[in-house]
Image (cartoon, rainbow, N blue to C red):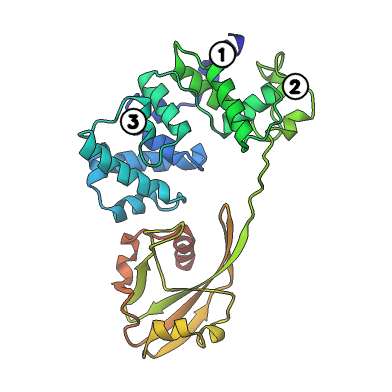
Amino acid sequence: MIFQKKITEWYHKNKRDLPWRNTTDPYKVWISEIILQQTKVSQGLPYYNRFIMEFPTITDLANAKEDHVLKIWQGLGYYSRARNLHFTARLIRDKYHSIFPSDYKSIKELKGVGDYTSAAISSFCFKLPYAVLDGNVFRLLSRYFAIDTPIDSSDGKKTFKKISQELICHKNPDIYNQAIMEFGAIQCIPKNPSCSVCVLNSSCKSYGTELVELLPIKSKSLKVSNKYFNYIIFNLGDNTFIHKRNMGIWKSLYQFPLIEGEFSFHEIQNLNVWKELVKQATVRLKFSSLPIKHKLSHQLINAVFHHVEVKDVISEKYLKIRWSKLDDYPLPRLIDKYLESLKK
């Protein structure tokens, strides 16, 4: 098939040299694919290297403490990925004796592994003919075949899955899958692709038309909500107070006491949640930071950090630690960046 041939030839000439492409170890490929979900290669590469250095085998990852795993992951976001990696490593250790499963069905049943990741691992490591469908492939196929069915609709998912599976190279599914993803990532890019030098332009149905900029189509627009966070940074001598989140996107990460809502510090002091927080402690506001905006895919967080001197222990729900030990705990990137700014 001409499409397969051109894509593969282009890949051999233009592919980036990435460490997970130089191995068929399913553990390392799995780690790379989970890291690259929602993350650009340039950002994910140093995290991949650090992760493999810290946890060179499935057993090393399985035996690690969750706090340590999250600390190594800190800054990448979407922390459920790290929690799922840790959970799945322990499952592979206990159920499969630390040997990564080699059949598509078992791989897909692993926590945190969906259609795309199971197809990637199956094809890259075991040469099984399962086609990958990520954002780059959706974009390439929608333009090449001029498909205006929304990629996030049930009909769209069925259409693209059928086409991608028909195109898969059964002889070398690993090379083909790498090639089609790489082509979408660096040739058929979202904005202003270089169509005039594209090896597929003679057969691309969108070439020379406005469809190049319009495709792919998405039916659902993501609604971004505003949230207001007031972090209370207590200073008790050389100590401060933190606690571990038990829900939300930053579940299992540590943070300073948090009061949500659009309040001034004066208004906060009149809230029942404040009174429960400080108990009978004597407090004094040192200063409040300027509002900081932290954008997530579905939220815009407006955060203010209130630095407060306290003379007594606050609510027992919080962990008292020495400031010098704070770096030992995994923190949301928002808090970590703010603390870094104080050092400048």
Closest to the observer, 161 or 127: 161
Quadrant of residue 210 within the rendered picture: top right
* Residue 244 position in % (x across, y down): 35, 65
> Horizontally, is 133 left or right of 101 in the view?
right
Residue furthest out toward the right: 209
How far apart are the two marked residues, 2 and 3, measured between alpha carbons?
A: 40 Å
Quadrant housing the N terminus: top right
- Three-letter amino acid code at disc 3? Ser
Q: Give the foreground label among 1 and 3.
A: 3
Q: SS of the residue at dot 3?
A: helix
How many labels were placed on the picture? 3
Q: Earlier in the sequence, mark 1 or mark 2?
A: 1
Q: Residue at x 35, y 54 (%)?
A: 71
Q: Amino acid at mark 2?
A: Tyr
Instruction: Tell me where residue 327 appears, x and y as whole percent.
Output: 34, 62
Element marked by disc 2: loop
| Residue bearing mark 1 | 4
Which label is found at residue 26?
none
Q: CA distance from mark 1 to mark 2?
A: 18 Å
Of the image marks 1 and 3, the number of the one nearer the N terminus: 1
Task: Sort mark 3 into few (<14), some (14-19) or many (20+) by Cα contacts within 10 Å.
Answer: few
Q: Which mark is residue 207?
A: 2
Q: Tell me the crowding category of disc 2: few under 14, some 14 to 19, or many 20 or more residues within 10 angstroms, Cα based.
A: some
92 horizontally vs 223: left or right: left
Toward the viewer: 132 or 179?
132
Q: Are marks 1 and 2 in contact (CB under 8 Å)?
A: no
| Residue type of the residue flagged with mark 1 | Gln
Return the residue at label 3: 106
Between the residue at mark 1 and the residue at mark 3, the CA separation in whole angstroms equals: 28 Å
- Measuring 67% from the left and 39% from the top, which residue is drawn there? 218
Q: Taking the image as drawn, is residue 242 in sight?
A: yes
Q: Is residue 194 left or right of residue 340?
A: right
